[in-house]
Image: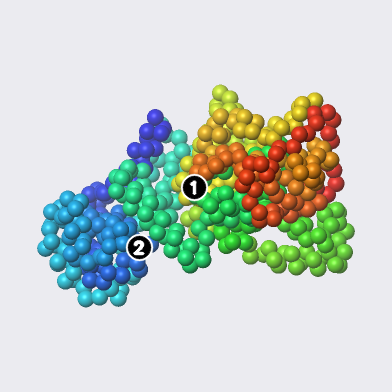
Amino acid sequence: MRNQNKKQYNNALYQPMSTNELGKIQPQAIELEEAVLGALLIESKAYQEIEDILTPNDFYSEKNQIIYKAIVSLSVKRNPIDMLTVVQELKSSGELDVIGGPLYIADLSDKIASSAHIIYHAQIINQKAKSRKLIRIASELSVKAYDETLDVEETLEELEMSLTELASNSSDCQSVSMGEALTEAMETASKTQELREKGIQVAIPTGLNTLNDILAGGWSAPDLIILGARPSMGKTQHSLSFAKAAAEAGKEVLFVSIEMKRTQLVNRYLLEDDRINSRHLKSGQMSTEEWSAMDERAGQLWNLKLNIADHHNIRYINNLKSEARRLKRKGKLQMMIVDYLGLIRTNMKFQSRQLEIGYITGELKNLAKELDIPIILLSQLNRPMKGTAIKEPQLEDLRESGDIEQDADIVLFIHKPDYYNPDVQDSKGVLWKGRGKLILSKYREGARNQPIIFHHDNRYKKIWDNGVSQSSADEYIPPVISPNTDFQDQKGDTPF
């Protein structure tokens, strides 16, 4: 019932209201709509100036919506935009008579002499459209607030989602035709190529060259990426490395830390400088040279586009989603990392933790789609039992793996053979010390199980690769490690 109400509410947000439904005339600018369309008809390149400002739904007049949709379609097909081509496009779609025939198109082109003010006019139209949507949101919210059968928390979340959609111009819940879907796909491909030609990378770099190659440049929206590992494999350190690589590339990143305080996370970035001793930092015994090194390191990190959420209530899924939406509305969110799945709570009752985990991963996948961002979610695997041979992690090793595997677009596992046996060697007789492997166990859009070898320093603060893709299956053979009899956790200056 809740889902049905939620769907009806979201669909209602974008249905046109009658003029007197709320007792007032809705915000609109019909004359400016006609002026914008007229400018587009007389200057073929004018559309490029407003394509990121307006969508067909921003027009109040249904006739104007149809015409602008035809113009968008012509642009995607890379056809010229003028009065004749728009008329032909409307004929092809069977909508020419709906808008009043060629005469209405001719009238539009006579209403304006140039496109000099088209951007300003388009921004006003966009503002009017947002005002109408905001009125609808407030109206529907008032009705739901009076309904005592509805969950207030769910109503608040729907409000948060609606405001985020309004701020980010994301699409509504209505279905679209194949033509519209193709138009959007072709538009996206065109923009991606245009950005690439300008030297702008759309995918978010991972910091590892081999992984970037496999993932066609890096992380992509709206993927849900699971980064899994057994205890002490360095999940947090890898996620911090991914966050820094993205932020250094100019991407806005949110790091949600449920387990650790922000000072602990920042200290790990500071301690990447080998001149700073972690024991001295923690015990207050820093030398003048170390303070100088820390000042220098802080200066290098100061402007990273990285936000850290570590409040004790961020563990609740609704709070986590609310913070992500808040940053998205401010234009400060392009990727999110959550450390880690096992600590997230819902404030809801489930028959089992497995069902709750399934709900959480489903919500995070939906959030990735809603905000159009990649989300990296850390997950802890069970430690291998004593007396059993050490094997590389597999999908079935994920706790409550069924739901996690189903919702994830990418599953990566961290494996460090030398953690269990410092003398273990690879197939070429080289020690695994200072190296590890990322195992790509699931990838919806590409090959799986390609080896991604990474290197790390003795303190496991820096993670990198040599840039050589390990693409051939015979280049890597999983090491055989003797049964795990009585290994001890490593001590000292290793930040796991």
Can you tell which quarter of the image residue 420 is in? top right
Q: Residue at x 85, y 43 (%)?
A: 491
Residue 339 sits above or below residue 134 on the image? above
Q: Is residue 364 visible?
A: no
Q: Looking at the rendering, which quadrant does residue 118 occupy? A: bottom left
- Residue 51 badge: 2
Q: Residue sitting at 40 percent across and 59 percent down?
A: 190
**Does 255 appear above or below 287?**
above
Residue 141: x, y in percent? 38, 44
Residue furthest top as drawn: 351
Marks 1 and 2, how far apart in space? 22 Å
Observer-nearest residue: 148 or 103?
103
Q: Position of residue 58 (x, y in %)?
A: 31, 57
Is the residue 437 above or below the residue 96 in the image? above
Residue 387 in the figure: left or right of residue 191 = right
Say the numbered circle drawn on residue 415: none
Which residue position is annotated with label 1? 222
